[in-house]
Image (tube, helix red, strand yellow):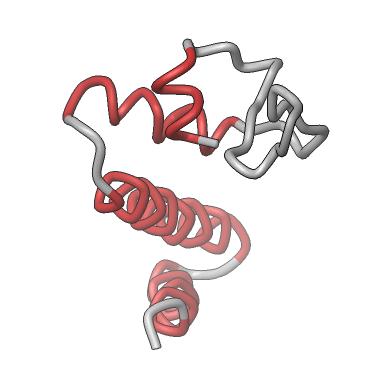
Amino acid sequence: MACNFFENGYRLLHPQIDWGGATGGEVESEFPIYQFLVALLYGLCGVSESWGRALSLAFSLLTVVYLRRLASLHTDPTTALLYGRPRSSRSFR
């Protein structure tokens, strides 16, 4: 979908796939904000799978920071720091 956003115009409400057959490839899917952001990165930096991976990593790290802050509202800072750490390491096994 990201390549199609990049190649066919950034039409967020009309996601397209490559295996549409004789149709235009438009599909019904979840809201494609991630694919749209990857397509924007393609436009800025060139087409590469690395941009999608970098975006996933950035969202993962932001989630860890958010979880730590959320945990610090309900526990002491040390426990909050330990809470975010194991969850971040599980993602990369």
Residue at 46% of width from left, 61% of height from top? 68
Q: Quadrant of the C terminus?
A: bottom left
Residue at 49% of width from left, 78% of height from top? 87
Relative vertical location of residue 51 with respect to residue 70 in this rendering, above or below: above
Relative vertical location of residue 91 with respect to residue 48 in this rendering, above or below: below
Q: Position of residue 29 (x, y in %)?
A: 78, 38
Relative vertical location of residue 71 with respect to residue 19 in this rendering, above or below: below
Residue at 19% of width from left, 31% of height from top? 46
Q: Residue furthest right?
A: 28
Residue at 72% of width from left, 38% of height from top? 21
Q: Quadrant of the N terminus?
A: top right
Give the quadrant of residue 82.
Answer: bottom left
Q: Position of residue 26 (x, y in %)?
A: 73, 26
Q: Residue furthest front?
A: 22
Q: Residue furthest bottom?
A: 93
Give the quadrant of residue 13.
Answer: top right
Total residue callouts: 0
Q: Position of residue 14 (x, y in %)?
A: 69, 18
Q: Nearer the viewer, residue 69 or 28?
A: 28
Judge left or right: residue 38 versus residue 41: right
Judge left or right: residue 81 versus residue 76: left
Q: Nearer the viewer, residue 85 or 82?
A: 85
Judge left or right: residue 33 versus residue 45: right
Relative vertical location of residue 68 with respect to residue 50 in this rendering, above or below: below
Q: Position of residue 61 (x, y in %)?
A: 36, 57
